[in-house]
């Protein structure tokens, strides 16, 4: 797993007990490298297209417009943080 450092200006993270989070496996749309992201479940549909869910990670390339994504660990995604 690759660690990415963010500056305080570029990263805005709100954490709260009443927010449900999900872990998503996808690709960085700029570098096209595989990444895992944690985000509020309510924002999932705003950041990822439904037709990309469970897309083919093996054939993904930089020319594709649709990012494949999936929630890799169902048990983790149901846990309260």
Image (spheres, rainbow, N blue to C red):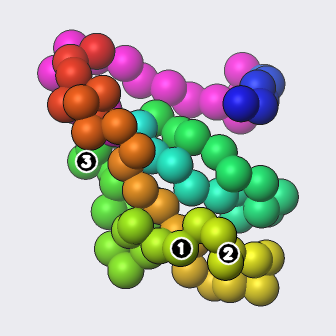
Which residue in the protein does label 1 denote?
A: 56
Asked which quadrant contains residue 29, the reply is bottom right
In the image, 33: left or right of 39?
A: right
**Which of the two discs, 3 and 1, sits closer to the camera?**
1
Question: Mark 3 and mark 2 in contact (Cβ < 8 Å)?
Answer: no
Q: Residues within 10 Å of mark 2 (few under 14, many from 20)?
A: some
Q: Residues within 10 Å of mark 3 (few under 14, many from 20)?
A: few
Q: Which residues are magenta?
A: 8-22
Q: Residues within 10 Å of mark 1 (few under 14, many from 20)?
A: few
**Which of the two discs, 2 and 3, sits closer to the camera?**
2
In the image, 65: left or right of 75?
A: right
Residue 34 on the magenta segment: no
Which residue in the protein does label 2 denote?
A: 60
20 above or below 79? below
In the image, 43: left or right of 13?
A: left
Q: Position of residue 68 (x, y in %)?
A: 52, 69
- Measure how far apart labels 1 and 2 are at the Cα level: 7 Å
Q: Residue at x 41, y 38 (%)?
A: 23
Asked which quadrant contains residue 12, the reply is top right
Q: Residue at x 56, y 80 (%)?
A: 66
- Measure how far apart labels 2 and 3 are at the Cα level: 26 Å
Front residue of 11/38: it is 38
Q: Secondary structure at mark 1?
A: loop
Residue 49 visible in the displayed image: no
Q: Quadrant of the N terminus?
A: top right
Q: Position of residue 2 (x, y in %)?
A: 77, 31
Question: Mark 1 and mark 3 in contact (Cβ < 8 Å)?
Answer: no
Secondary structure mostly taken by the magenta-highlighted segment of the chain: loop
Which residue in the protein does label 3 denote?
A: 42
Q: Secondary structure at mark 2?
A: loop
């Amino acid at each position: 797993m690759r660690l990415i450092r963010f500056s305080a200006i570029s990263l805005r993270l709100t954490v709260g007990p009443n927010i449900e989070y999900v872990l998503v496996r996808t690709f960085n749309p700029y570098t096209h490298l595989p990444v895992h992201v944690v985000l509020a479940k309510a924002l999932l549909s705003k950041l990822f297209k439904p037709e990309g869910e469970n897309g083919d990670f093996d054939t993904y390339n930089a020319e594709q417009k649709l990012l494949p994504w999936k929630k890799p660990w169902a048990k983790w995604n149901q846990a309260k943080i």
